[in-house]
Amino acid sequence: MALDLCSVPCIVGHVLYQQGIYQYTYVVFVADFGINSILYQRGIYPPESFTFQQQYGLTLLTTTDEGVKEYLNNVLAQIKDWLEQGEIQRLVLAVSNVDTQQVLERWDFDIQHEPGFGPQSIKEGKIGSKDLKVIQKEMRDVIRQITASVTFLPLLDCVCSFDLLVYTHQNAEVPDKWAESAPCFISNSQEVRLKSFSTSVHKVEACVSYKVDL
């Protein structure tokens, strides 16, 4: 089920089982800064609407646009809830031509539980054993590859907008402001697989599809 927040993170939650919670919020962290990096690198918003910050040994970009910040905060807070409930399967960022509504790029982040983990893991206090430094290195590699994507993706020479889709299990509890959405697939597309990372609770595999005949 693909869902879209009807509108147009800031990780929230209690530190119950500290390392275990961090392993969940690392996924949200990569989603947050991955989305911001894509919006910056692909020119969806002007460079002056972003600011820099240092975290985990990376210089990261975050939007200063209040409307975009509010939208991302709402989406990522809900993603964190679904992660902890074991309901999320995939996050998609779709880039579209504003004039034609044609989808030009689709960034997929597939999110799966690692073997031995599931929806009840956080309630049971079950945590992964992977070293946090290794997790953080894999996170940095993913963000760096997103940053380097401008070297192989086609130039977006039109005004573009973005949309975020979240794929959940069919029985997931969905807030009122969310609605089912079209999948935003791209016809005649090329796909490039990006690096994956694992928290030992979740594994995230990323790829970007883009329209060849822009």
Image: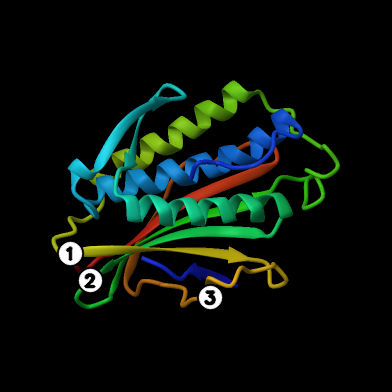
Q: Residues within 10 Å of mark 1 (few under 14, many from 20)?
A: few
Q: Residues within 10 Å of mark 2 (few under 14, many from 20)?
A: few
Q: Position of residue 168 (x, y in %)?
A: 63, 65
Q: Is residue 104 above or below residue 187?
A: above
Q: Residues within 10 Å of mark 3 (few under 14, many from 20)?
A: some
Q: Position of residue 39 (x, y in %)?
A: 30, 50
**Numbered circle sitting on residue 98:** 2
Whether the residues at callouts 1 and 2 have beta carbons within 8 Å, the answer is yes
Q: CA distance from mark 1 to mark 3?
A: 25 Å
Locate residue 162: give its quadrant: bottom left
Q: Position of residue 42 (x, y in %)?
A: 25, 51
Q: Earlier in the sequence, mark 1 or mark 3?
A: 1
Q: Is residue 156 above or below residue 39?
A: below
Q: CA distance from mark 3 to mark 2?
A: 21 Å
Render colour scheme? rainbow
Number of the front mark, 3 or 2: 3
Q: Is residue 89 left or right of residue 16?
A: left
Q: Earlier in the sequence, mark 1 or mark 2?
A: 2
Q: Which residue is mark 3?
A: 179
Element marked by disc 3? strand
Q: Is residue 99 left or right of residue 211?
A: left
Element marked by disc 2? loop
Element marked by disc 1? loop
Locate residue 159: give its quadrant: bottom left
Q: Which residue is mark 1?
A: 159
Q: Position of residue 89 (x, y in %)?
A: 62, 59
- The residue type indicated by label 3 comes to Ala
